Image: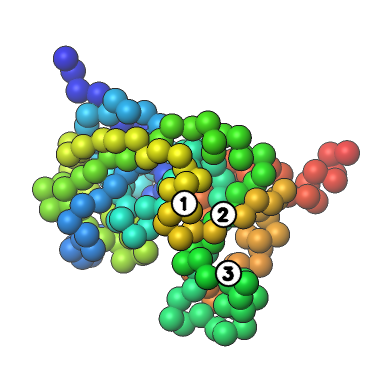
Amino acid sequence: MSPRVDRRPPRGGLPAGVALKGVPPTSPTLLHFSEDPGITVFEPRPVASNPDSEPLVWAIDEAHAPLYYFPRDCPRVCFWALPTSTAEDVDRYLGVTDARIVIAIEGAWLERMRETTLYAYRFDAAAGGFVSLEDHGAHVSRRTVVPTSVEPVGDLLTRLRDAGVEVRLTPSLWPLRAALLNASLHYSMIRMRNAAAPPSEKDQKT
């Protein structure tokens, strides 16, 4: 039987021409999440939106895995405090929670969250040739990588709760995105191309 190869567009990517530094992995085991349970081989591939970018296999470390406890296409805005974050920003965005990470999604995605079965693929970081991007858990490899295991993540909201993540539901992610761009917190904005149109664009269409 031919190996099942993951050829879908990646979650994100490096701009063309960015050189990798060869920084060792931050964890001996890395993760990749998919709604497909049958992938046996991960091949390096360029970013779908930038075919000239370097082909890579992407993975995340355990500490930042909750950023991917979501349906693959779910738009989300994730943020948390850094040692360099200002007290004003921490109070404004995190002052009423003790969650280590806050992740906002559109309320329209709640049912998909409840219904989606997600799978966690594990990679041996050293054997897979992964290097750290020094960007909050992100790792890449130039090699073809065979996962060591795959298992269902389980109920996504339960896993997020158990990971100490606060999930916020909002009609639109765009106001939060605009605010965080000027904040001193770390933020990660994932799959925003799938987000509902900003309120101003909706008003123009009505």
Give me the residue at 34% from left, 35% from top.
Answer: 152
User: Disc 1 residue type?
Assistant: Leu
Q: Residue at x 57, y 77 (%)?
A: 90
Quarter where residue 5 is shown:
top left
- Residue 50 is at least partly visible in this image: no
The quadrant in which residue 23 appears is bottom left
Q: Residue at x 18, y 43 (%)?
A: 143
Q: Give the CA separation, mark 3 to mark 1.
A: 15 Å
Labelled disc at residue 97: 3
Instruction: Tell me if residue 101 comes above or below residue 58 in the rendering.
Output: below
Going by the image, does 157 lie left or right of 152?
right
Mark 1–mark 2 CB contact (< 8 Å): yes
Q: Nearer the viewer, residue 96 or 138?
A: 96
Would you say 119 lies left or right of 23 here?
Answer: right
- Residue neighbourhood size for the residue with mark 1, other residues' Cα within 10 Å, grouped as few (<14), some (14–19), many (≥20): many
Which residue corresponds to the image point at 53% horizontal and 31% vertical from the top-left?
115
**What label sits on residue 160 in the rendered view?**
1
Type of the residue with mark 3: Thr
Image location (x, y in percent) of residue 191: 53, 45
- Looking at the image, which residue sits at the far top? 1
